Structure formats: C-alpha cells, structure tokens
C-alpha cells in the first residue's frame, strides 16, 4: 500500500513525486519553483539569484489562484 493512502483524502498529495519528476539533478544546490497548478515554473542549478527569484515569485503570486 503506498504511504499516501494512509492519509485522509483531503490530505493526500495530488500526485506522488519521484526523481523522474524533476529530471536529472546533476549539481547542488538545485532549485525548482512549483506553480499553483503543480507545474515546474522555474529550474535553476547553482547559486541562486535572489533578486531574480523574488521577481519570479512576485509574478507567480500575482496570478489568480
């Protein structure tokens, strides 16, 4: 039995994620930004650009839910 089935229905993840979801992570740090629909909005390898990250997040948060 997968672990998510032991959770109440309203607490189960919409889908289980595994390493194939994010592709071939080759370096650390590796960052993924997930949008409201559960899709990958951004992928960045290496040291983060925090100014760019804040701009991206502001834009995603401004989108309707």
Image (cartoon, grey):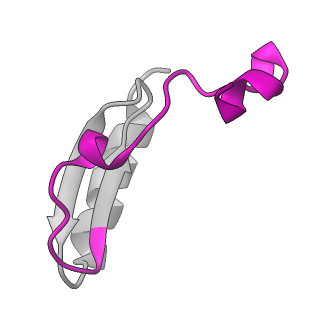
Number of numbered discs visible in the structure rendering: 0
Residue stretch in magenta = 1-30
Up-down: is 65 above or below 46? above
Q: Residue at x 44, y 30 (%)?
A: 36
Nearest to the observer: residue 12 or residue 41: 12
Answer with left or right where residue 45 lies relative to residue 32.
Answer: left
Q: Is residue 32 left or right of residue 37?
A: left
> Is 4 rendered above or below residue 27?
above
Question: Which quadrant of the structure image shows residue 18?
Answer: top left
Q: Look at the magenta stretch and give its main secondary structure.
A: loop
User: Is residue 12 a member of the stretch shown in magenta?
Assistant: yes
Instruction: Give x and y (percent) for residue 63.
Output: 38, 28
Q: Residue furthest top?
A: 9
Residue 26 image point, x, y percent: 14, 71
Quadrant for the N terminus in the image: top right
Q: Give above or below for 49 relative to 59.
A: below
- Identify which residue is drawn at 22% across, 85% down: 47
**What residue sits 41% from the left and 23% below the top?**
37
* Residue at the bottom extreme of this rendering: 47
Which of the two residues, 16 or 59, is positioned nearer the viewer here? 16
Q: In this view, does 26 lie to the left or right of 41?
A: left
Asked if residue 24 is among those painted magenta in the image, a careful observer would answer yes
Residue drawn 25% across the image and 78% down it: 48
Taking depth in this image into account, of 57 and 1 the one nearest to the observer is: 1
Measured from the top left, where is residue 21 in percent x and y?
29, 40
Looking at the image, residue 32 lies above or below residue 3: below
């Amino acid at each position: 039995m997968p672990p998510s089935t032991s959770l109440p229905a309203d607490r189960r993840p919409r889908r289980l994620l595994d390493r194939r979801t994010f592709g071939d992570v080759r370096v650390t740090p590796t960052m993924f930004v997930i949008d409201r629909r559960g899709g990958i909005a951004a992928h960045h390898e290496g040291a983060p650009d925090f100014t760019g990250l804040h701009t991206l997040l502001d834009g995603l948060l401004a989108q309707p839910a």
